[in-house]
Amino acid sequence: MSKEKTFETISYSIENQIAKVTLNRPEVHNAFNEVMIRELLEVFQEISKSEDIRVVILTGRGESFCAGADLNWMKRMINFSYEQNLEDSLKLAELFFLMYSLPKPIIAAVNGAAIGGGTGLVAVCDIAIASENAKFSLSEVKLGLVPACISPYVIRKVGEGRCRESFLTGERVTAQRALELGLVNQVVPLTQLHIAVDEKVKQLLSSGPKAIAMCKELLKNVPGMSFDKAMTYTAEMIASMRIGDEGQEGMNAFLEKRKPKWTR
């Protein structure tokens, strides 16, 4: 069963428990504006609540993944008040947090350049697979700005030391360098991108959906905890998972040498 929904700046479809979100402004290299932010918020809120979706793929139409913020949109904001700028920025920050904390895994299929906020979109995804031709840059300083809303996620992804160089220089790096930095997980030829993504989707679909959601909770919460708090938090989590329906099914399936019910 497949489902498609039409938007102004993105395309969105669901098929076989896989949601595909495509940034669809190829004429401006999929740069985001207030409309795209609003539409992405709507889609990811829907995905978060859906029990029919197991995995999300995020990609861009055309030659680029995402060129960051639309300069025409930013030019309009020059005349906005501080309060209006803050309102817009909070929407963007809300989107990044929603994606980062989504209970479903998100794979970024980086088909081309990911610049500024586009690099931020890569950072909030759980797994990023990039084509060899992809380029990355935190270029905000070149415009007299800073990578503010994306900074919590980029710093977590690649570390403060590497971000000091990237944030301050705005240097553009290759896909291979992004792999070395830890921003992406795999680099493949553009013609092989969909194959690599499909393989990763299969791996995710073979894992328990509740377990994946709880893994994301661990990743979000544990780094900020003291060891004492983490000890209790993690022990309580694994205890509840062991007696839960999914944990029981997974362990029984392993012992009975069969596939668990959540696999296809």
Image: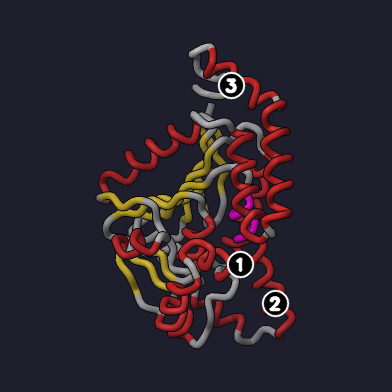
Query: Which of marks 1 and 3 precedes in the sequence?
Result: 1
* Image-based side of 10 in relation to 43, left or right: left
Which residue does the image show at 56% across and 35% down from the upper left? 54
Measure the C-alpha gap from mark 3 to mark 2: 49 Å
Based on the picture, tell me whether residue 171 belongs to the magenta stretch.
Answer: no
Residue at 67%, 79% in the rendered image: 85
Q: Identify whether 15 is placed above or below 81.
A: above
Asked if residue 198 is positioned above or below residue 24 in the image, the reply reads: above
Q: Please, which colouring scheme is shown? A: secondary structure
Of mark 3 and mark 2, the one earlier in the sequence is 2
For residue 206, above or below residue 64: above
The magenta span reads 96-101
Label 2 close to label 1 by CB (< 8 Å): no
Q: Earlier in the sequence, mark 2 or mark 1?
A: 1
Can you tell which quarter of the image residue 261 is in?
top right
Q: Is residue 106 above or below residue 88?
A: above
- Which disc number belongs to residue 34? 1
Which of the two residues, 50 or 150, is positioned nearer the viewer here?
150
Left or right side of 10 for 220: right
Q: Residue 251 carries which label?
A: 3
Tell me the distance, in whole angstroms, between the alpha carbons under discs 2 and 1: 13 Å
Three-letter amino acid code at the position of disc 3:
Met
Disc 3 and disc 1: Cα gap in Å? 46 Å
Foreground: 31 or 188?
188
State the image coordinates of residue 118 (x, y, percent, origin top left): 47, 65
Q: Could you tell me residue 133's position as x and y percent? A: 27, 60
**81 to the left or right of 185:** right
| Residue receiving disc 2 | 86
